[in-house]
């Protein structure tokens, strides 16, 4: 076993070493290019603004690549800064060049951080006055040069640290009071820039901490500066920027100043900072600074010290700590009971420290995470300087935050504080019995809030606490708690709602594994390492985490019951119904791991929850009871026993009375009734699958009645649950001979509801119910059921828009065909098959539309699926039904759907068509089978993306050359090429026209003539059907443009063009649809290029439209006619002498004028074009 563990560890290390380094950079490789760009600043400074911005953008892009590895530029940072400093120091350079250099310097600061850059800036005395003067000369309100001011403030903050008295730089006698000293000048700069609304505010705060804490400055100005800050920050006229800037100055001074210098002012500062002015409506950034100042005031009150009482161990490295637990390195930790330093009894703690602690505890309750985090770090730092007794009181105050009365912010802040205390060794082992239980509660904290819940941030913070424990404590300290911690972490890994929390706990489990080793479970290390590698990404999918990962974990017996208990107590009544249903399925999967516990503990608890008024709890309990009972029945079946032997009499009785009890309490009414009906349908399904011994009980009739009620419900999930449960219930409890009389009643009831339905939903539910009936009910009533379902698919004035009910009727016919597969050729006759085929083929022509769009697509898709299932069944059991004519209709209809507009429908039809070609046994009577097999090679189509139009259109378009498929494929292609979607039109038209050109090249005019005849026939068959004629106009327009009709146009003996023009005229005659007219105008203009009678007819029709009653139509006609004459005018019948004048009139006339004004102009155009002038027809009396 040890050898295997060692090998597993080595393999794990090998696999994990390169993780995360794939995109890492190795060194600053572009430094030469960066230097060259800086040198070019003198050249580009006078260039156009776009050139300057482009160069700056390139500079920023190069350096921003190192923002996650900024240390790589350290080798060249001095040279980089020196080049830009030289530009600034040179007095001959223009101020614009210096501004540009400061912009580039800011990019470097942004990448590497100002704290590092400041250390590399020059701090020579000679730079002091020039930098100060340049900074004084800047306009604080100029938004273009803020980077200059920011860098100068940072530069000045390192220069003011020079070890000389500031008075030496004045250059005049102290008695000359009218002149400003250097101290005053710098202080004025700080006051100016501390309250500006840009980033210079942060630099000014940093400058204040370096300047005001100088020995020569603090004597004169520290007290005055504090007075200025206090007065300005509390002023009612101060905005948020002023408050932020002043607070930032105080925070940085308290951080960098000496304790003895700041101590005299701390009480006053504390009274100031606890003012409510800063806590009400001040924003998270200001509150963050408030608690920074509070904690630093507390640290100022207390002398720096390392608490002698803190918990210490020799190993502070997490990696070494974990390794020590594994036994791979010697444990060198020193327990605090072995070496104890004397406690400092003479330490006096000022009373103000209590106020500081209270404020920080209050900060832990803040609504902003960043404020809570700041307060938590303050708690850790201040506690580290307190005596043991007072520190323990602080821990107690933090633990009080974990109260049910507290909001989620307090829990989160408490977790952060515990983590900070733990990792600093300030949380002593004696406190762990009180700390660990609240951490375990925090790991599963999830409270409903409106339509959602809160708690993910608390669970993440609790993982941070666990991390701090693994880092801080010795193995033997955590031994009593590690099992509970590991169990709770595994619970969060499997069952947390948020994916980030599930992944985080997997990592935390990896850190905790060494603790488990000390309990004596050696396999934990090996299995948990495997767990981390295998499910780190698996837990990202919630279903997988609930249903698979949890089952894997329960192979360790110590975790089985905690997982089940968590599901029972925390997830069964979860606010999210999806979580409750997943919980029930998870309990189903976990039942084989602890069947006795499920029977004796879980099921009684769940039945108790069914009595509650909480809808969520009742819903989850009902679903879970059904799942557990079904899982127990599987166990009973495997052990060759009966389910009633596993369940107690009391549980069986409660199961039997559950739904009657709900009906008595009216739980199926109202809004909550929806959830309960769905849950009870699932419950009935699982109880029926479990074969509970209720065969002679009246409760079965009650169950069937409930399912029948659900069939007519509006909510689709409720109907689906009832339909899923119905065949299982009937199969189990109605299959005996004593129930034969009920079979006929059930069928009559469903058929009656199906045909007399006054609403679509009722018909949908009962149609699917008929399709779900088991075989023993279908057989004696097959004719009656099939005829009724076929009748329900017929379109009547009442059911015109009921495409969904027709779809469900087709689905029912498909289900019946599958159920009766064994009876094909017997009870399921050829006559039945042909009737169903007729319904399916009619369904392919359902193009019903409403405000939702093409709802007939649902019917067509159901029909395609039905054709597939029935045809494949008949090819195996009764192939004689599949005649040549029938197969042509089936395949051509499916091929048409495979080239139409909707992607989903095309993908389904493509897969079904392909399944016919390579089915085993082979589908008989497929016309041109060999040619089709070549078009759809198996190796290619097995991996073909059927959802891709660019992949499917080139294949199906080749079916046009096969006569049985030409009409339907061309019909589908016309709809697609004439569609509106750009991608659809592009792929369909390119595939079709490429195919037509290749056919013309290989077969000549004969093939294109055959296709044109088909197009004409389609147009004739669908005259006045806008679904076809509107795309037909666009299709013909593109067909003319493609050049595929050139041979037809040139052959005077062919009348295709003339016949099509006649149909177009008939189609637009009396048309009131403007958009259809516009498409008609476009195609009419194509006929201008054909000399002779056709051109004249088209021009006459267009001249009629020039006087249409709609001004938009008139304007569009003139525009399109002008464009067509511009391209094809030389090929038209119009005389070349008149062509220019015609085009001039078309372009210069205002066609939106009244028709009476336009008509003489139109008549003039007719004369110029040499066509008859249209005459107004007389209205019939």
Image: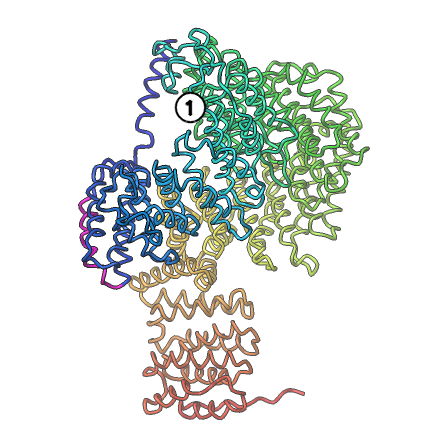
Q: Can residue 64 be seen in this view?
A: no
Q: Which stretch is magenta? A: 31-48
Counting from the top left corner in percent of width and height, residue 297 is at 48, 32
Counting from the top left corner in percent of width and height, residue 361 is at 56, 30
Residue plotted at (19% across, 55% down):
40
Dominant secondary structure, magenta: helix
Residue most toward the top? 338
Q: How crowded is mark 1: few (under 14 residues within 10 Å), some or many (20 or more)?
A: few
Which picture quadrant has residue 732?
top right
| Side of 930 relative to 863 (left or right) | left
Q: Is residue 37 magenta?
A: yes
Residue plotted at (63% across, 51% down):
804
Residue most toward the front? 175
| Residue identified by numbered label 1 | 304
Q: Quadrant of the N terminus?
A: top left
Which picture quadrant has residue 13?
top left
Picture mark count: 1
| Side of 635 relative to 510 (left or right) | right
Q: Establish if 110 lies above or below 444.
A: below
Residue most toward the right? 664
Q: Is mark 1 on a helix, strand or loop?
A: loop
Counting from the top left corner in percent of width and height, residue 534 is at 42, 25
Q: Is residue 387 visible?
A: yes
């Amino acid at each position: 076993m040890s050898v295997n563990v060692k090998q597993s560890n080595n393999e794990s290390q090998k696999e994990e070493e390169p993780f995360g380094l794939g995109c890492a950079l190795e060194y600053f490789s572009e430094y030469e290019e960066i230097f060259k760009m800086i040198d070019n600043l003198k050249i580009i400074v006078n260039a156009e603004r776009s050139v300057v911005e482009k160069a700056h953008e390139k500079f920023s892009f190069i350096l921003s690549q190192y923002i996650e590895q900024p240390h790589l530029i350290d080798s060249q940072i001095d040279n980089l800064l020196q080049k830009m400093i030289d530009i600034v120091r040179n007095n001959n350079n223009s101020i614009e060049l210096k501004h540009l250099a400061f912009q580039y310097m800011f990019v470097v600061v942004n990448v590497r951080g100002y704290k590092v850059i400041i250390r590399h800036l020059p701090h020579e005395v000679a730079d002091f006055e020039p930098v100060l003067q340049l900074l004084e000369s800047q306009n604080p309100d100029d938004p273009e040069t803020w980077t200059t001011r920011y860098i100068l403030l940072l530069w000045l903050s390192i220069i003011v640290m020079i070890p000389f008295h500031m008075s030496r730089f004045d250059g005049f006698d102290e008695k000359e009071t009218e002149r400003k000293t250097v101290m005053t000048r710098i202080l004025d700069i700080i006051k100016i820039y501390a309250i500006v609304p840009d980033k210079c505010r942060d630099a000014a705060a940093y400058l204040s901490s370096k300047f005001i804490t100088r020995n020569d400055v603090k004597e004169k100005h520290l007290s005055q500066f504090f007075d200025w800050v206090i007065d300005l920050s509390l002023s009612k006229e101060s905005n948020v920027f002023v408050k932020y800037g002043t607070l930032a100055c105080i925070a940085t001074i308290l951080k960098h100043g000496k304790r003895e210098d700041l101590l005299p002012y701390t009480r006053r500062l504390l009274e100031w900072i606890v003012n409510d002015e800063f806590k009400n409506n001040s924003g998270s950034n200001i509150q963050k600074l408030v608690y920074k100042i509070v904690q630093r005031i507390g640290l100022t009150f207390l002398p720096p010290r390392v608490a002698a009482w803190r918990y210490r161990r020799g190993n502070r490295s997490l990696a070494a700590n974990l390794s020590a637990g594994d036994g791979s390195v010697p444990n060198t930790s020193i327990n605090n009971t072995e070496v104890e330093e004397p406690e400092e009894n003479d330490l006096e703690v000022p009373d103000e420290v209590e106020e500081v602690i209270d404020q920080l505890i209050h900060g832990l309750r803040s609504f902003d995470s960043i404020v809570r985090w700041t307060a938590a770090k303050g708690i850790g730092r201040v506690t580290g300087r307190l005596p043991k007794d007072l520190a323990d009181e602080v821990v107690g105050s933090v633990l009080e935050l974990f109260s049910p009365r507290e909001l989620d912010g307090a829990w989160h802040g408490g977790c952060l504080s515990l983590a900070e205390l733990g990792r600093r060794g300030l949380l002593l082992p004696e406190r762990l019995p009180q700390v660990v239980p609240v951490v375990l509660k925090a790991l599963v904290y999830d409270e409903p809030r409106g339509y959602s819940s809160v708690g993910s941030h608390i669970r993440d913070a609790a993982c941070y606490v666990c991390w701090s424990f693994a880092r801080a404590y010795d193995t033997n300290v955590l031994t009593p708690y590690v099992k509970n911690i590991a169990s709770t972490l595994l619970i969060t890994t499997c069952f947390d709602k948020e994916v980030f929390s599930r992944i985080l706990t997997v990592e935390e489990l990896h850190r905790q594994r060494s603790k488990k080793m000390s309990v004596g479970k050696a396999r934990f290390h090996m299995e948990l390492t495997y767990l981390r590698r295998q499910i780190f990404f698996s837990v990202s999918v919630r279903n997988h985490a609930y249903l698979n990962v949890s089952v894997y974990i329960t192979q360790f017996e110590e975790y089985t019951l905690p997982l089940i208990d968590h599901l029972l107590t925390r997830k069964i009544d979860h606010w999210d119904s999806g979580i409750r249903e997943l919980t029930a399925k998870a309990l189903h999967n976990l039942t084989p791991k602890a069947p006795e516990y499920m029977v004796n503990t879980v099921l009684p608890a769940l039945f108790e929850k069914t009595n509650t008024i909480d809808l969520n709890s009742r819903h989850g309990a009902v679903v879970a009871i059904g799942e557990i009972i079904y899982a127990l029945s599987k166990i009973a079946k495997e052990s060759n026993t009966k389910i009633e032997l596993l369940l107690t009499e009391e549980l069986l009785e409660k199961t039997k009375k559950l739904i009657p009890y709900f009906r008595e309490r009216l739980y199926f009414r109202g809004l909550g009734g929806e959830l309960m009906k769905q849950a009870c349908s699932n419950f009935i399904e699982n109880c029926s699958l479990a074969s509970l011994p209720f065969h002679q009980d009246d409760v079965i009739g009650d169950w069937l009645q409930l399912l029948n009620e659900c069939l007519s419900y509006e909510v689709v999930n409720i109907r689906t649950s009832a339909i899923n449960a119905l065949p299982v219930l009937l199969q189990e409890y109605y299959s005996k001979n004593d129930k034969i009389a009920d079979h006929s009643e059930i069928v009559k009831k469903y058929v009656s509801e199906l045909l007399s339905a006054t609403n679509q939903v009722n018909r949908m539910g009962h149609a699917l119910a008929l399709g779900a009936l088991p075989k023993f009910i279908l057989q004696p009533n097959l004719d009656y059921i099939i005829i009724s379902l076929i009748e329900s698919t017929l379109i009547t004035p009442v059911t015109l828009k009921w495409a969904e009910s027709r779809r469900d009727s087709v689905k029912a016919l498909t289900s019946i065909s599958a159920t009766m597969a064994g009876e094909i050729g017997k009870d399921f006759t050829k006559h039945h098959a042909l009737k169903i085929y007729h319904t399916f083929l009619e369904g392919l022509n359902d193009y019903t539309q409403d405000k939702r769009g093409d709802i007939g697509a649902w019917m067509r898709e159901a029909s395609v699926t039905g054709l597939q299932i029935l045809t494949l069944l008949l090819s195996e059991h009764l192939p004689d039904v599949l005649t040549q004519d029938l197969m042509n209709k089936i395949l051509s209809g499916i091929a048409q759907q495979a080239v139409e507009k909707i992607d989903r429908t095309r993908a389904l039809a493509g897969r079904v068509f392909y399944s016919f070609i390579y089915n085993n046994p082979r589908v008989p009577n497929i016309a041109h089978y060999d040619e089709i097999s070549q078009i759809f090679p198996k190796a290619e189509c097995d991996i073909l993306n059927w959802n891709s139009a660019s992949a499917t259109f080139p294949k199906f378009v080749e079916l046009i050359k096969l006569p049985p498929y030409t009409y339907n494929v061309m019909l589908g292609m016309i709809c697609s090429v004439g569609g509106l979607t750009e991608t659809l039109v592009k792929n369909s038209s390119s595939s079709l026209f490429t195919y037509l050109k290749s056919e013309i090249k290989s077969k000549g005019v004969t093939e294109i003539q055959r296709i044109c005849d088909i197009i004409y026939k389609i147009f004739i068959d669908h005259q006045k059907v806008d679904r076809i004629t509107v795309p037909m106009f666009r299709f013909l327009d593109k067909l003319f443009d493609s050049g595929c009709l050139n041979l037809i146009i040139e052959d005077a003996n062919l009348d295709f063009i003339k016949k099509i023009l006649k149909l177009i005229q008939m189609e637009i005659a009396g048309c009131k649809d403007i958009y259809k007219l516009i498409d008609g105008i476009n195609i009419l203009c194509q006929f201008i290029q054909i000399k002779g009678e056709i051109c004249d007819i088209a021009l006459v029709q267009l001249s009629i439209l020039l006087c249409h009653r709609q001004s938009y139509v008139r304007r569009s006609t003139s525009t399109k006619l002008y464009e067509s004459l511009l391209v094809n005018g030389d090929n038209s019948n119009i005389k070349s002498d008149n062509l220019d004048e015609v085009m001039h009139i078309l372009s210069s006339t205002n066609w939106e004028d009244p028709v009476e004004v336009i008509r003489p102009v139109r008549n003039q155009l007719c004369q110029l074009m040499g066509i008859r002038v249209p005459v107004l027809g007389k209205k019939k009396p």
